[in-house]
């Protein structure tokens, strides 16, 4: 059965000038490039693909017990990396880190 | 799922005027149309009504109710075809009502006689019944008028524009015209009859990873953007429907080249011990940088301060952090105990909020009557508390989600008057012209402290002059407008 759970991440760049080149490499790794910024690239892909590309396990984010009030998170299931994501060797010169994104709360 | 062919048809049966009487047929080309003055001329004899009803029952139809003018009956589609010899076809309600007024059909499709279908009532009915019309699904007409609720609340646009002192700015000819305000949220149901009737200049796009631009399944964005338009009715509004990656949505929003960005979303930076985080989590570092970049490029960025949250980006030093002030039915003003107020443990010297908009009180901040997509999550979920229907396309909500777009609307007024204002100029003038809020306290949930080894939540109180609970106070659009 296909793994359709989508995960989003920010790929932090060492040099802004490398953004387009890094975006191309990320697409070759079968990740969807959502947005290219000056300092980071937003990518999306299946949970399984993320775990494979970045060599980390993704586990469901724990819900922190908060006394604050909101309309809940925007989007569905969210994940965090059980261990720091590893930058693939072909991106290591250009990418500083990869951060799995959490959905924001609607205030 | 039930389709049109498996459901019962609702049918209106007209009675045939006997040939030897003066009874008129409403289908006659020469007879007058039925009116109150001539309706008696169309009435059938009671005996005919009874005979027709009996015969229809015998054929298998259910007679719901009869009058001297018609019979309302029910029957299955195959029975209708068998009795009247009429082939039926399925039609889409939507296709049949292009360009129509906003309305929600009671069903998506219906059965109707196929083109050139025959009409051959059986012998016993032929003298009794003139026509039998299958009824089409009726429409719920959406109203641009909000429902009535019986407690103190604010209605848009008038109450917001009055209490934020934006009405006086409008009367001076400044309404936000030519200023582009972008908002990132759950979606934007800008086809709501209220928004259509107001003829606002609104558009929407999909942010990265988001789908279905025309819907807002949650309702949050559709409702909260009403706050912007109440304050800056001629602003050019662009809604960006966000996927779960707010950083990606923010980058896309900047690309739209707005003057102002309003965001009523954020993160609660509270550790598992309940205390504020002292460093920004890695997953928010890109967003932190993109916000700074946007402000550096001249975009004024407004974020909600949170509703008891230790909010980020609500604590980002470069943004305008929108907190809450509540005004009751006697115009008494106090800090909203629903809105956040705290000192950032990440950015030294940063106090949240900067200024406030209008926000309700606990427990639910039920305060501002706002339009949203009928039957969306908020419409359904808050109907138990707010006195509106679960499917009427209106909810009474607020939170600092309402305050941020209100302040964004004020920023638009200032930018129209003086396009050269920088984000720092705007933040400064909003602060120095705000109305001091001296009573009440903010939501203590946003200010956790450890005392004697125990976690406590300490409310930040309002007081004379600038204070932690409301910052500089409630924004006064006219006072700020006069100074730019």
Image (cartoon, coloured by chain):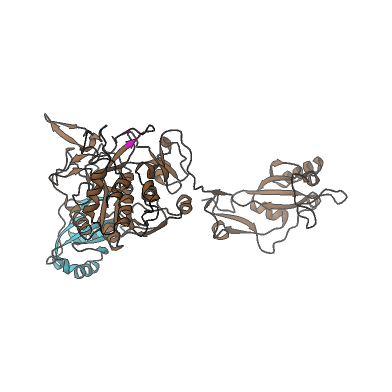
Chain colours: A cyan, B brown
Q: Residue furthest right?
A: B20
Q: Image point 45% across, 52% down: which residue?
A: B195
Residue B269, position in %: x, y? Answer: 20, 44
Is B447 in the magenta?
A: no
Residue B336, position in %: x, y? Answer: 29, 36
Q: Is residue B30 visible?
A: yes
Task: Report the front residue among A94 and B333.
Answer: B333
State which region is magenta.
B326-333
Is B330 in the magenta?
A: yes
Task: Report the front residue among B71 and B3.
Answer: B71
Q: Residue furthest top?
A: B452
Q: Could you tell me how many numbered marks the image carries?
A: 0
Query: Is residue B142 depicted above or below B340 in this figure?
Result: below
Task: Report the front residue among B366 and B159.
Answer: B159
Query: Is residue B77 depicted above or below A62 in this figure?
Result: below
Residue B383, position in %: x, y? Answer: 43, 38
- Magenta stretch, main secondary structure class: loop
Q: Is residue A75 visible?
A: no
Q: Residue B101 is drawn in which quadrant?
A: bottom right
Q: Residue B201 is drawn in which quadrant?
A: bottom left
Task: Report the front residue among B118 and A37.
Answer: A37
In the drawing, does residue B192 fall left or right of residue A44?
Answer: right
Query: Is residue B403 depicted above or below B102 in this figure?
Result: above
Residue A65, position in %: x, y? Answer: 24, 38
């Amino acid at each position: 059965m296909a793994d359709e759970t989508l995960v989003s991440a920010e790929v932090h760049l060492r040099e802004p000038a490398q953004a387009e080149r890094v975006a191309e490499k990320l697409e070759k790794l079968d990740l969807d490039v959502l947005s290219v910024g000056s300092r980071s690239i937003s990518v999306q892909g299946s949970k399984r693909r993320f775990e494979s590309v970045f060599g980390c396990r993704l586990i469901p984010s724990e819900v922190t017990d908060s006394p604050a009030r909101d309309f809940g998170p925007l989007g569905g299931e969210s994940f965090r990396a059980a261990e720091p994501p590893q930058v693939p060797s072909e991106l290591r010169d250009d990418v500083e880190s990869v951060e799995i994104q959490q959905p924001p709360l609607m205030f | 799922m039930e389709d049109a062919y498996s459901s019962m048809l609702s049918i209106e049966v007209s009675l045939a005027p006997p040939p030897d009487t003066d009874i008129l047929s409403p289908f006659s080309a020469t007879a007058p149309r039925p009116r109150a003055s001539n309706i008696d001329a169309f009435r059938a004899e009671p005996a005919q009504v009874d005979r027709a009803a009996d015969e229809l029952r015998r054929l298998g139809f259910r007679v719901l109710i009869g009058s001297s003018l018609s019979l309302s009956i029910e029957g299955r589609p195959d029975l209708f075809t068998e009795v009247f010899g009429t082939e039926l076809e399925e039609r889409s309600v939507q296709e049949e009502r292009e360009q129509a007024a906003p309305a929600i059909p009671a069903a998506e499709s219906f059965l109707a006689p196929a083109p050139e279908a025959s009409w051959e009532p059986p012998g016993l009915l032929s003298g009794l019944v003139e026509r039998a019309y299958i009824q089409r699904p009726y429409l719920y007409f959406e109203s641009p008028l909000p429902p009535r609720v019986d407690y103190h609340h604010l209605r848009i646009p008038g109450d917001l524009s009055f209490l934020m002192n934006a009405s006086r700015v409008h009367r001076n000819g400044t309404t936000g015209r030519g200023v582009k305000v972008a908002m990132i949220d759950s979606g934007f149901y800008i086809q709501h009859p209220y928004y259509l009737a107001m003829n606002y200049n609104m558009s929407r796009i999909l942010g990265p990873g988001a789908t279905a631009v025309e819907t807002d399944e949650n309702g949050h964005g559709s409702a909260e953007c009403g706050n912007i338009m109440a304050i800056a009715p001629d602003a050019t509004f662009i809604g960006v429907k966000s996927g779960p990656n707010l950083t990606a949505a923010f980058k896309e929003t900047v690309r739209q080249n707005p003057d102002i960005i309003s965001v009523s979303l954020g993160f609660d930076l509270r550790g598992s011990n309940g205390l504020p985080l002292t460093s920004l989590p890695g997953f928010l570092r890109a967003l932190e940088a993109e916000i700074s970049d946007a402000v550096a490029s001249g975009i004024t960025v407004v974020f909600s301060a949170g509703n008891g949250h230790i909010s980020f980006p609500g604590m980002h030093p470069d943004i305008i952090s929108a907190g809450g002030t509540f005004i009751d039915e006697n115009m008494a003003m106090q800090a909203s105990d629903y809105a956040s107020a705290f000192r950032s443990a990440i950015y030294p010297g940063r106090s949240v909020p900067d200024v406030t908009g209008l926000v309700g009180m606990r427990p639910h901040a039920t305060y501002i009557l706002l339009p949203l997509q009928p039957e969306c999550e908020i419409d359904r979920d808050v109907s138990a508390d707010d006195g509106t229907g679960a499917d009427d396309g209106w909810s009474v909500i607020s939170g600092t989600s309402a305050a941020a777009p209100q302040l964004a609307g004020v920023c638009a007024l200032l930018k129209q008057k003086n396009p050269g204002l920088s984000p720092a100029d705007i933040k400064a003038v909003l602060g120095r012209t705000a109305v001091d809020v001296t009573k009440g306290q903010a939501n203590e949930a946003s200010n956790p402290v450890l005392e004697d080894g125990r976690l406590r939540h300490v409310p930040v109180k309002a007081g004379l002059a600038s204070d932690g609970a409301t910052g500089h106070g409630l924004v006064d659009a006219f006072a700020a407008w006069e100074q730019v």
